[in-house]
Amino acid sequence: MTTNRPAFAVAEPSAEQRPSVVWEESPCPLCRRNTNSLLLEAPDPLPPPGTGFVFAVVRCDHCGLIYTNPRPDARTISQFYPSDYHPHRRPGKMRHSRPARPIWSRLLGRPCSERRGVLPWPGPGRLLDFGCGAGSFLKTMAAQGWEVTGLDANVGAVKQVQEQHGLTALVGTLPHSDLQPGSFDVVTMWHSLEHVHRPLEILREVYRLLVPGGKLIVATPNIQSLPFYLFRQDWFGLDLPRHLTHFTPSTLAAMLQTAGFRPEPVRQFRHGDWLRSSARLATRQGNRSVWSRLLRWKPAARLTAWVCYAIGVSDCMMCIAERPT
Ligand SMILES: [Zn+2]
């Protein structure tokens, strides 16, 4: 069945609030087919007054990719990003990375933020961070000797990286005219791939920018997770409409392979904070389930996140993929 659903409003925003959002129907971002089925509808989770819109999330009938459809187009989606959106916070408010000890990290399923100081490359190389935000990761890697470049659509965030850290950062997306083919050893995408309108095209451009044998590291939420099934439309990882593609381990690997990469097995991470955020959001939306009450409690959230990790149903995942030589 081909869907033709507009995004609709439960409380119609005023003209001043949303002066020029342009909506678009998208074919599947992976296989480009147009047949899909509705998975759920959910509101923008921003705190009140929010945006008032409810969005549809669909699953491609052909390849199984889950994505937001319809969606604001690439030129107007910035209206849905508040100025204090998490990745763009000032570095002083962000927790800095520290190198993880691989065995303990693997055993405990540490959150991505604690693994960001370790990259699968023999010694410092040339790094591109796609969706660099305020630049805390770039700063960490530059301190380890890496030659770093940041790329972000947010002008303020890029300016912050340049002026406060003195590091190279560019405004925009991929392809970018200032970036040359084969000029990076590692490209990182920490929770940025789910934000882009054309993820497969972005990955193909990353392939072009990497040297043969270069590594791509992608971290995204995992919709095939216990937290999603517990919270559904209140799951923190949906973040509509800012998250446009909602990956599972298999669709993430499939997209990487389609772009030409050789992906390693997808790894999962625990995120007690995400569970607590989902529980708080569910409560705010009037969901009084036992899970929304229990998981606002930090020890319960941490224990549940660890159980999710241990049985392979965490809501955060990462994949390392190689550009074949
Ligand atoms: Zn598809």
Image (spheres, rainbow, N blue to C red):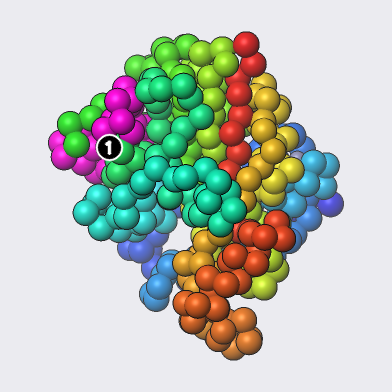
**Residue 241 visible to an observer of this rendering:** no
Residue in view at x 77 percent, y 37 percent? 33
Left or right, 46 with reference to 231 = left
Q: Few, some or many C-alpha atoms within 10 Å of disc 1 (few <14, some 14-19, many ≥20)? A: some
Residue in view at x 51 percent, y 29 percent? 120
Query: From the viewer's perspective, is residue 76 above or below residue 278?
Result: above
**Residue 188: horizontal and vertical position, in percent?**
47, 34
Badge 1 element: helix
Tell me which corner region of the image, top left, top right, bottom left or bottom right, holds residue 130. top left
Query: From the viewer's perspective, is residue 281 above or below residue 260?
Result: below
Q: Which residues are magenta?
A: 141-164
Q: Amino acid at mark 1?
A: Lys
Left or right, 221 with reference to 34 = left
Q: Nearer the viewer, residue 28 or 133?
A: 133
- Count of labels in the image: 1
The residue beneath circle 1 is 139
The verdict on residue 71 being magenta is no
